[in-house]
C-alpha cells in the first residue's frame, strides 16, 4: 500500500514536470536541476556559472531551501532574477513547487534557468521539475564512497562536478575511485573536477553547459 502511494506521488509529479517542460520549451528556456549534499558548493557554482555566462545568456535562478533566503540573496546581489522556494520541511523541490514559482519570471526573457535543489543526496533525484538535465556536485570532504552509497543521483545526473579540489591534499578523497564508481553507475556521466573557490577546472564545465544549451536551441523549430 505504501509503495503504491509513493508511486502515485511520483506519477503526479511527472505530469506536472511535463507541463513545466512544455512551458520551458515554448519559451526556449534550458533548465538545470542542480543537486548535492548540503554545503557541497551549489550556490557557489551558480555564482561562478553566472559570472562566466551572463554575457552570453539571460540567466535566472530558483533557490530551493527548507527555510531562509540567504542563497537567493547571494544571487540577487548579482542582479539576476531569482525566486526562493521554502519547502517548509520537505527535503527536495518538486514539479509543483517550481510551477508555483514560474509566475515570478518572464520566461520569454530567460535562456538558462538554474534550479538549486535542497541540500540532500537522496530524494531530489526522484523528483523531476521539468529540467533538461540534472547536474550534481560531490565535494572532496564528503568522501569517495558516495557514488556506491547514494547511486540514484549519480544514475540520474548528466554531469558530476567534483568540487573543492583545492582541499584534495587535506582530505582523504580517492579521486580515481569516485570517478570509477560514478561511471560504473552511469557510463554517460560527464565528470568535471573543479574548485569553485580558485576557479580551477571551471572552463570545461562552462564549455559543456554551453554545448548543452546550444544543442537545445538548435533542436527547437
Ligand atoms: N575550499 C572550498 N570551499 C568551497 C568551494 N566551493 C564552495 N566552498 C565553500 O563551501 C561552503 C558551502 O558552499 P555553498 O555554495 O553555500 O554550498 P551549497 O551546496 O549551496 O549549500 P546548501 O545550499 O546549504 O546545501 C561555503 O563556505 C563555500 O564558500 C571550493 O571549491 N573550495
Ligand atoms: Mg546553496
Ligand atoms: Zn525529499
Image (cartoon, grey):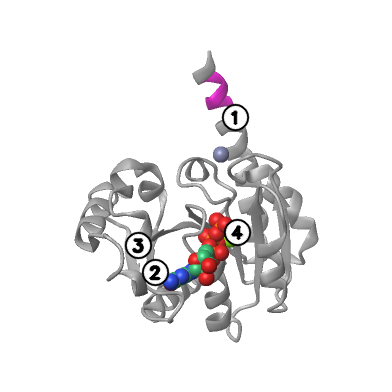
The label shown at residue 109 is none
Q: Is mark 3 within 8 Å of ligand 1?
A: no
Answer left or right for 207 relative to 5. Answer: left
Write down the region rendered in magenta.
4-8
Give the quarter of the figure containing the C terminus. bottom right
Using the image, determine if residue 40 lies above or below residue 121: below
Residue 13 in the image, given as x and y percentages of width and height: 61, 37
Judging depth in this view, the residue of 9 and 65 nearest the camera is: 65
Which x, y percent locates residue 62? Answer: 66, 60
Mark 3–mark 1 Cα distance, whole angstroms, equals 34 Å
- Marks 3 and 2: in contact by CB < 8 Å? yes
Task: Mark 4 and mark 1 in contact? Answer it, CB < 8 Å.
Answer: no
Foreground pick, 51 / 196: 196
Cα distance in 3D space between marks 2 and 4: 21 Å
- Residue assigned mark 4: 115
**Residue at the bottom extreme, as displayed:** 55
What residue sits 59% from the left and 29% below the top?
A: 9
Tell me the number on the disc at residue 164.
2
Q: Secondary structure at mark 3?
A: helix
Mark 2 C-beta to ligand 1 under 8 Å: yes
Circle 3 sits on which residue?
A: 140
Amino acid at each position: 500500500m505504501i509503495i503504491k502511494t509513493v508511486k502515485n506521488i511520483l506519477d503526479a509529479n511527472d505530469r506536472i514536470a511535463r507541463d513545466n517542460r512544455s512551458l520551458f520549451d515554448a519559451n526556449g528556456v534550458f533548465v538545470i536541476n542542480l543537486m548535492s549534499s548540503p554545503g557541497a558548493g551549489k550556490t557557489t557554482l551558480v555564482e561562478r556559472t553566472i559570472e562566466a555566462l551572463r554575457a552570453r545568456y539571460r540567466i535566472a535562478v530558483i533557490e530551493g531551501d527548507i527555510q531562509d533566503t540567504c542563497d537567493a540573496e547571494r544571487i540577487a546581489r548579482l542582479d539576476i532574477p531569482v525566486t526562493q522556494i521554502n519547502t517548509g520541511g520537505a527535503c527536495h523541490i518538486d514539479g509543483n513547487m517550481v510551477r508555483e514559482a514560474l509566475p515570478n519570471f518572464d520566461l520569454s526573457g530567460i535562456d538558462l534557468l538554474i534550479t538549486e535543489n535542497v541540500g540532500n543526496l537522496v530524494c531530489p533525484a526522484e523528483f523531476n521539475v521539468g529540467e533538461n538535465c540534472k547536474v550534481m556536485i560531490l565535494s572532496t570532504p564528503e568522501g569517495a564512497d558516495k557514488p556506491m552509497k547514494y547511486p540514484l543521483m549519480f544514475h540520474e545526473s548528466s554531469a558530476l562536478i567534483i568540487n573543492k579540489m583545492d582541499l584534495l591534499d587535506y582530505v582523504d578523497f580517492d579521486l580515481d575511485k569516485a570517478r570509477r564508481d560514478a561511471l560504473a553507475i552511469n557510463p554517460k556521466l560527464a565528470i568535471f573536477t573543479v574548485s569553485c573557490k580558485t576557479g580551477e577546472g571551471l572552463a570545461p564545465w562552462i564549455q559543456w553547459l554551453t554545448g548543452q544549451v546550444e544543442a537545445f536551441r538548435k533542436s527547437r523549430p
